[in-house]
Amino acid sequence: MNARALLIRGLIAGLVAGVATFVVAYAVGEPHIDTAVSIEDGQPHTHSHDEAVEEEGGIEVSRDNQKTWGLLTGTLTVGLALGGIVALVAASTIGRLGSLAPSQSTALVALLGFVAFVLVPFLKYPGNPPAVGSGETIGDRAALYFGFVLVSVLAAVASTYGALKVRERLGTYGGVVAGIAAYLAVVVVAGQLFVTVNEVGAFPADTLWFFRRASLITLATMWGVIGVVLTGLVSRLYAAQTAEAERRQLAAGL
Amino acid sequence: MSQPAALPVPGAASVPTIPLRELAPWALFYGLLGVLVIFFVTADQGAVSIPSGTALHEWVHDGRHLLGYPCH
């Protein structure tokens, strides 16, 4: 177990997750993006697609490229980045989360990462299809979204650390309950304090729901595959190292 | 660190930890790289543009939407 071994496995998990996420996003998400783009093209808009881009002197990217190579670029790079980060966070928790085995710590990190980095921010600021959202408020919306992600992730890290401290006094049950309660308290209060954004307007509710459901499935695929693959790889790595250590001990005893 | 009474499996081999000192340079280097990559794919040429233009935004457009980030 060392940082390098974990990072390499994280990158492998991220690569697999990036490909899987592309397939799922293409199959589940793209039909609804196409619908949203066709709605967008039928209304006056403030931002760029197709012809509008040329007017601004930018480079045009065809829809065919956006939904294949462009989408693949996004899922692969984000997959590799997240896979490596999850692996290094897991590396820091191995052996430090009570009596959890390395594979269990890794799985827990991936699960908490999904909840804190994706699921809870999604509940406050869900993803939007093209045609929803005014180009003039992108600065505010980006700041709110990333600010909320930051609050959620910091709360998750602090709550986990706090849970370990409480566990020393009250045992595992008390520690886990205290940790989850502390995290929920922070994100619920933050959720009330952060401004709500609603720029849906007259956008069709069915397309909006289908898109958001597809977005959540896409994100769950990314984190689920990273978690499952990395947990399996860490489990194998630890088993191999344990077997090796036992062999050495046996040889030394002869 | 005192162990709570509820811990199972007496005599179980304790799990080795990776020293934080060994982990720190990896976390710093890859953490920065990862955050930078995530920024360029999920946020660049929206609220903040480095470099200016829309090429990168347009190329990763669908991924940005489906991964739930504010796109435009």
Image (spheres, coloured by chain):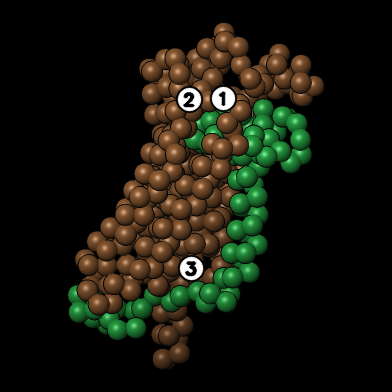
Q: Residue A225's quadrant in the figure?
A: top left
| Residue extending farthest right | A57
Q: Residue A134 carries which label?
A: 1
User: Which chain has been coloured green in this picture?
Assistant: B
Q: Where is residue B42 in the image (x, y as percent from the top left)?
A: 59, 39
Is there a contact, CB below 8 Å, between mark 1 and mark 2?
Answer: yes
* Mark 1, secondary structure of its residue: loop
Q: Which label belongs to residue A92? A: 3
Circle 2 SS class: loop
**Of A222 and A145, the residue lying toward us:** A145
Q: Can residue A235 be seen from the camera position used here?
A: no
Q: Distance between the residues labelled 3 and 1?
A: 41 Å
Name the chain letter of the residue that bears numbered label 3: A
Q: Which of marks 1 and 2 is nearer the N terminus?
A: 1
Distance from Cα at disc 1 to Cα at disc 2: 7 Å
Identified at 37% across, 58% down, the residue is A108
Identify residue type, mark 3.
Ser
Looking at the picture, does residue A154 appear above or below residue A202?
Answer: below
Q: Colour of chain A?
A: brown
Q: Which residue is drawn at 75% across and 31% down?
A: B53
Q: Which circle's residue, 3 or 2, is located before the other in the chain?
A: 3
Residue A90 image point, x, y percent: 46, 62
Q: Do labels 1 and 2 share a chain?
A: yes
